[in-house]
């Protein structure tokens, strides 16, 4: 049984999925945000996969390194700061944690939820490879939602699904992973290359005319809608058809609770600890 699917199939256990780790209290997509998510008992964490110039899979949300690293300081004047224009060695020289204290994107620092000592530990965090992120997950006996970003624009990188699956298989982690993507072709490839791995269809901006039909067509296990495009009736229809539904990014805990009451199977949130409490998981 796929661990991730088994989790999704238990309605009495509304899943808490930590978006890019516990991103409300630690720098996103780092091993530190993952560790914090694990400490507060998130059921899974979510991460984003990108390619380096030398074809290595790394955990990074944006196409460029500017927002979440000190790349402009370390490599001043580079014509491009795209992840795919840096080798892994170059990426590993970056600090992916120091930006966090200056940004306070969720107001958690101003609210006194992070001590100066904790903030100091973020200095010098690095960009993890997908392999490092998966190994941490396995060490924790945990599960992860691997979101494959769109690589269609990268000439020569046509095998992202294959590369991700190869790694997951090598680490013997098929049952610990759910793969999601906005690029639905990747999900079909996943199903073809590794039918035993769980998959989830990410959708945003425009609600698909028929979410159930889409999930059937893509042969996925789950529907991952932006909270803004979930229509009344989608949740029961999808659950009745046997699909899990994990909604993102839900940071209002009343909304999280309402979505679960209406039938969602999981909540993807920047605040896994608060979400656990709101959903009565503590
Ligand atoms: O997987 C849910 C969510 O992460 C999708 O959007 O842009 O935060 O990766 P994004
Ligand atoms: Mg994501």
Image (tube, grey):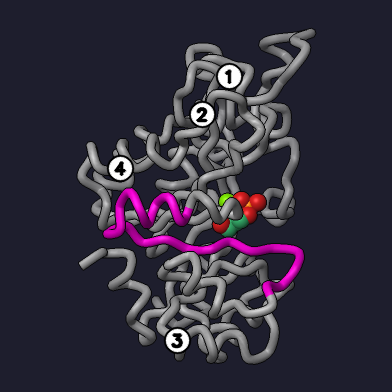
Q: Is residue 190 magenta?
A: yes
Select label 3 or label 4 by which is in front.
Answer: 3
Q: Are marks 1 and 4 in contact (CB under 8 Å)?
A: no
Secondary structure of residue under mark 3: loop
Under tag 1, what secondary structure? loop
Mark found first going from the N terminus, 2 or 3: 2
Residue on which the image places disc 4: 168
| Vertical arrangement, residue 1 with respect to residue 44, above or below | below
Q: Residues within 10 Å of mark 2 (few under 14, many from 20)?
A: many
Label placed on residue 127: 2
Residue position marked by numbered label 3 in the rendering: 241
Few, some or many residues within 10 Å of mark 3 (<14, 14–19, 20+) = few
Q: Earlier in the sequence, mark 4 or mark 2?
A: 2
Secondary structure beneath label 2: loop
Q: Which residue matches tag 1?
A: 94
Magenta-colored span: 187-208
Q: Residues within 10 Å of mark 1 (few under 14, many from 20)?
A: many
Q: Position of residue 200 (x, y in %)?
A: 47, 63
Residue 253 lies in magenta, yes or no?
no
Residue nearer the viewer, 59 or 216: 216
Contact flag, marks 1 and 2 (Cβ < 8 Å): yes
- Relative to residue 92, is residue 8 drawn left or right? left
Q: Residue at x 59, y 16 (%)?
A: 86
Q: Tell me: 258 left or right of 42.
A: right
Spatial separation of the CA atoms under disc 2 and disc 3: 39 Å
């Amino acid at each position: 049984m796929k661990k991730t699917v088994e989790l999704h199939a238990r309605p009495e256990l509304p899943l808490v999925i930590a978006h890019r780790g516990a991103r409300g209290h630690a720098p996103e997509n780092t091993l530190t945000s993952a560790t914090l998510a694990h400490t507060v008992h998130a059921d899974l964490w979510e991460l984003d996969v990108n390619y380096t110039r030398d074809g290595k899979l790394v955990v990074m949300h944006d196409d460029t390194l500017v927002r979440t690293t000190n790349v402009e300081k370390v490599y001043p004047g580079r014509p491009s700061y795209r992840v795919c224009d840096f080798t892994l060695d170059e990426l590993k020289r970056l600090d992916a944690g120091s930006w966090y204290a200056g940004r306070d994107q969720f107001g958690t620092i101003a609210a006194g939820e992070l001590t100066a000592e904790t903030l100091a530990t973020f200095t010098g965090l690095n960009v993890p490879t997908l392999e490092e992120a998966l190994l941490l997950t396995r060490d924790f006996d945990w599960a992860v939602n691997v979101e494959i970003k769109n690589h269609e624009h990268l000439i020569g990188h046509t095998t992202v699904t294959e590369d991700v699956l190869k790694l997951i298989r090598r680490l013997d982690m098929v049952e610990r992973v759910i793969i999601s993507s906005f690029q639905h072709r990747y999900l079909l490839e996943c199903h073809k290359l590794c039918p035993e791995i769980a998959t989830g269809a990410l959708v945003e901006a425009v609600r698909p005319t028929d979410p159930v039909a889409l999930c059937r067509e893509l042969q996925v296990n789950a529907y991952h809608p932006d909270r803004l495009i979930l229509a009344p009736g989608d949740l029961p229809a999808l659950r009745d058809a046997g699909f899990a539904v994990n909604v993102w990014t839900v940071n209002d805990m009343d909304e999280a609770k309402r979505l679960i009451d209406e039938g969602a199977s999981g909540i993807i949130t920047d605040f896994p600890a608060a979400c656990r409490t709101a959903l009565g998981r503590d």
